[in-house]
Amino acid sequence: MQIMQEEGKSGGRYRAELAGHFGEMTYSRASPSLIIIDHTQVDDALRGKGVGQALAEHAVLEARSGGWKIIPLCPFFKAQLQRHPEWHDIIQG
C-alpha cells in the first residue's frame, strides 16, 4: 500500500489506495510546526485491512521526521494513540 500526501496552503491529507479503494486522513496546519488531524475516512471495502492504522503510522512518522507536533481531533486517531503510547512524543499538549 502506498500513501501519498497532498498539501495545500492551510492543510492537506494523507491518502492510501488498495485494490481501487481509498482511505484518507485529513489535517489542517496550525503553524509550520503543528498540524491538527481532524478526520479519517476509509472505504467500507478496506475496513479491517489496516489502512487506517497505516495512515496513522504515516502521520506519526511524518511528524517525527518534520519536527512538528500533532493535535489529535479525529476520534480514530485518538483511539490509535490509546493503543500506541510510544507515539505520545509527537502530541501537542
Image (cartoon, rainbow, N blue to C red):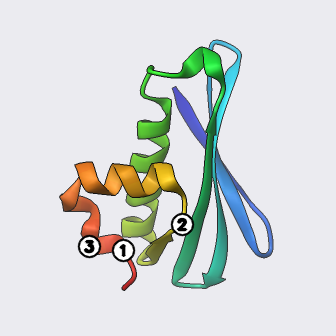
- Name the residue beneath numbered marker 2: 73
Residue placed most toward the observer, 92 or 32: 92
Q: Is residue 62 above or below residue 45?
A: below
In the image, residue 45 lies at what x, y percent?
Answer: 62, 15
Mark 3 Cα-neighbour bin, 10 Å: few <14, some 14–19, many ≥20: few
- Marks 1,3: beta carbons within 8 A: yes
Label 2, secondary structure: give it.
Answer: loop
**Mark 2 or mark 3: which is in front?**
2
Q: Amino acid at mark 3?
A: Asp
Q: CA distance from mark 2 to mark 3?
A: 16 Å
In the image, residue 88 lies at what x, y percent?
Answer: 26, 68
Q: Amino acid at mark 2?
A: Leu
Residue at 56% x, 20% y: name it.
Answer: 46
Q: Is residue 40 left or right of residue 63?
A: right
Residue at 24% x, 48% y: name it.
Answer: 83
Label 3, secondary structure: give it.
Answer: helix
Mark 1 Cα-neighbour bin, 10 Å: few <14, some 14–19, many ≥20: some
Q: Earlier in the sequence, mark 2 or mark 3?
A: 2
Residue placed most toward the observer, 72 or 29: 72
Residue placed most toward the observer, 53 or 78: 78
- Name the residue beneath numbered marker 1: 91
Residue at 63% x, 12% y: name it.
Answer: 19
- Name the residue beneath numbered marker 3: 89
Q: Is residue 44 above or below residue 88?
A: above
Label 1, secondary structure: give it.
Answer: loop
**Mark 2 or mark 1: which is in front?**
2
Image quarter of the C terminus:
bottom left
